[in-house]
Image (cartoon, rainbow, N blue to C red):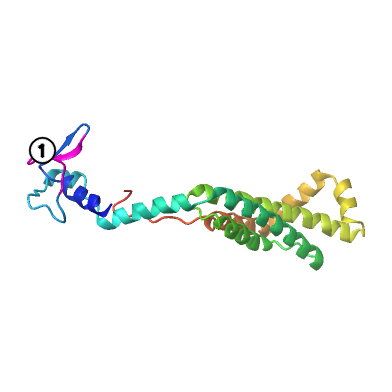
């Protein structure tokens, strides 16, 4: 691979290059495929082509190979599976802490976003789809945590069982309460959770200097 890259670096910008169907890149001087090692003694750079399409640097090939390897390693199913588990665990933890303390704790959303993002990241994702799913799961976890917290706090206030409130509650009422809660600073924490769910779910790849390969 390294030898082929070296040949490509020279021949693609040489005035003696030619392309023959069925054979590929050949040298006009020898009418044969390039077969030198290291530098070509007869290389003569095509200045006009170099201006329009600069020769890739050796490190650019390394970046390209690394990216292909990372794409091959990513596992969306694993990331989503762990993300769903984190979503459920985060919602349950939010509701249990809120009920036990007697307070609706909005900043729990920050922890939920981190938990979901960290879980999604175990899929070794490098594409934005991991971040989109991570953000969606983080939001879902926040909504569920908020919802079950309110149900639990109402049950605690009226000394009823959790399931009695859950089965008899008017969802329009609980939705109205949740919207009022969002109108407060809670929506800011939701936003942070969305950002964490997206940003932490995958690893962004650096582009080589000069743009895409």
In this rendering, would 7 be left or right of 198? left
* Residue 140 x/y as whole percent: 67, 50
Residue drawn at x 69%, y 59% is 90
In this rendering, would 213 be left or right of 155? left
Looking at this rendering, what residue extends furthest in the top direction? 21
* Residue at numbered disc 1: 31
Image height check: is 103 above or below 161?
Answer: below
Badge 1 marks a residue whose secondary structure is loop
Please identify the quarter of the rendering in which residue 88 is found. Answer: bottom right
Viewer-proximal residue among 159 and 207: 207
Please identify the quarter of the rendering in which residue 63 is found. Answer: bottom left
Residue drawn at x 8%, y 48% is 44
Q: Would you say the magenta stretch is mainly helix, strand or loop? A: loop
In this rendering, would 103 be left or right of 14? right
Range of residues picked out in magenta: 23-35
Asked whether the viewer can see residue 122, the reply is: yes
Viewer-proximal residue among 83 and 194: 83
Residue drawn at x 72%, y 63% is 105
- Residue 146 is a magenta residue: no
* Residue 185 x/y as whole percent: 66, 59
Q: How many C-alpha atoms fall within 10 Å of the one at disc 1: few (<14), some, or many (≥20)? A: few
* Residue 102 x/y as whole percent: 81, 65
In this rendering, would 68 be left or right of 16? right
């Amino acid at each position: 691979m390294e030898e082929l890259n070296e040949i490509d670096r020279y021949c693609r910008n040489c005035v003696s290059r030619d392309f023959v169907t069925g054979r590929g890149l050949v040298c006009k001087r020898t009418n044969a495929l390039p077969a030198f090692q290291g530098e070509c003694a007869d290389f003569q750079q095509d200045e006009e082509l170099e201006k329009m399409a600069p020769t890739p640097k050796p490190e650019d090939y390394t970046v390209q190979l690394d990216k292909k390897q990372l794409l091959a390693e990513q596992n969306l199913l694993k990331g989503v599976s762990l993300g769903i588990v984190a979503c459920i665990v985060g919602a349950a933890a939010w509701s249990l802490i809120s009920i036990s303390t007697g307070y609706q704790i909005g900043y729990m959303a920050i922890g939920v976003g981190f938990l979901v993002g960290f879980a999604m990241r175990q899929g070794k994702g490098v594409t934005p789809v991991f971040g989109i799913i991570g953000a969606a799961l983080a939001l879902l976890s926040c909504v569920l945590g908020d919802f079950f917290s309110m149900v639990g706090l109402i049950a605690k206030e009226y000394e009823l069982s959790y399931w009695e409130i859950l089965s008899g509650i008017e969802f329009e009422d609980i939705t109205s309460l949740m919207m009022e809660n969002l109108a407060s600073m809670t929506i800011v924490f939701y936003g942070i959770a969305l950002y964490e769910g997206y940003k932490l779910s995958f690893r962004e790849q650096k582009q080589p200097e000069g743009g895409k390969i």
